[in-house]
Image (cartoon, rainbow, N blue to C red):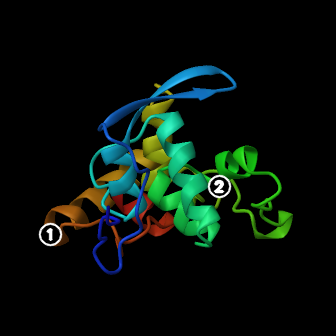
């Protein structure tokens, strides 16, 4: 009997006679799709996801074959924290200084002042009565917007503009 041949550059997955197998784990029986596991091992997992048991098997097979944990994480479709939880001796958690801060960073903004377009927006958002300075500033900015199609570069309201408007 000869061993089955494997295409060059491919990593062989689980060798079984069936496409779906039952695997005994500490939590109980797990149903594993061996075709999905082999495709994920070879980086062909696009647009579909693995079950948790299949992802763990994929990560284990990749790590035992010497692939870096980042590759195992991407191909198994799990995040780094899950990989560290599953394989604490193999995968080390990221250094504290290299971790990203949570959430999207907002640009630094100065406090909103009355007499600006942002002041007008704040009044509207808070459902307050809009003051005259903010109303005039919004009119000036909106006039610029109608001409240029953007608020970027719109002129700011000055005290001289307010006197002319009155």
The percent position of residue 15, horizontal first and vertical second, equals 40, 50
Q: Which mark is residue 79?
A: none
Q: Which residue is mark 1?
A: 147
Q: Which residue is mark 2?
A: 80
Q: How many marks?
A: 2
Element type at mark 2: helix
- The residue at 83%/56% (across/down) is 89
- The residue at 48%/67% (across/down) is 158
Question: As drawn, is 125 to the left or to the right of 27?
Answer: left
The percent position of residue 138, horizontal first and vertical second, equals 35, 52
Q: Residues within 10 Å of mark 1 (few under 14, many from 20)?
A: few
The percent position of residue 68, horizontal first and vertical second, equals 61, 72
Give the alpha-carbon distance from disc 2 to disc 1, as whole Å: 50 Å
Can you see residue 108? no
Of residues 165 and 7, the one nearer the viewer is 7
- The residue at 45%/48% (across/down) is 134
Residue occupying the far front of the picture: 1
Q: Residues within 10 Å of mark 2 (few under 14, many from 20)?
A: some
Residue occupying the far top of the picture: 28
Judged by depth in the image, the label closer to the viewer, 2 or 1, is 2
The percent position of residue 51, horizontal first and vertical second, equals 45, 34
Can you see residue 134? yes
- The residue at 50%/40% (across/down) is 122
């Amino acid at each position: 009997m000869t061993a089955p041949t494997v295409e060059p550059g491919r990593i062989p997955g689980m060798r079984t006679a069936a496409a779906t197998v039952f695997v005994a784990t500490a939590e109980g029986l797990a149903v594993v799709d061996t075709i999905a596991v082999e495709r994920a091992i070879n980086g062909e997992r696009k647009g579909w996801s693995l079950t948790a048991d299949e992802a763990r098997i994929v990560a284990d097979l990749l790590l035992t074959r010497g692939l870096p944990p980042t590759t195992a994480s991407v191909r198994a479709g799990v995040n780094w924290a899950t990989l560290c939880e599953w394989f604490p001796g193999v995968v080390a958690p990221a250094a504290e200084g290299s971790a990203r801060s949570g959430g999207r960073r907002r640009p630094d903004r100065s406090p909103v002042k009355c007499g600006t377009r942002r002041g007008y927006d704040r009044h509207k958002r808070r459902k307050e009565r809009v003051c005259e300075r903010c109303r005039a500033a919004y009119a000036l900015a909106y006039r610029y917007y109608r001409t240029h199609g953007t608020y970027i570069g719109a002129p700011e309201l000055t005290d001289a503009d307010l006197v002319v408007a009155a």
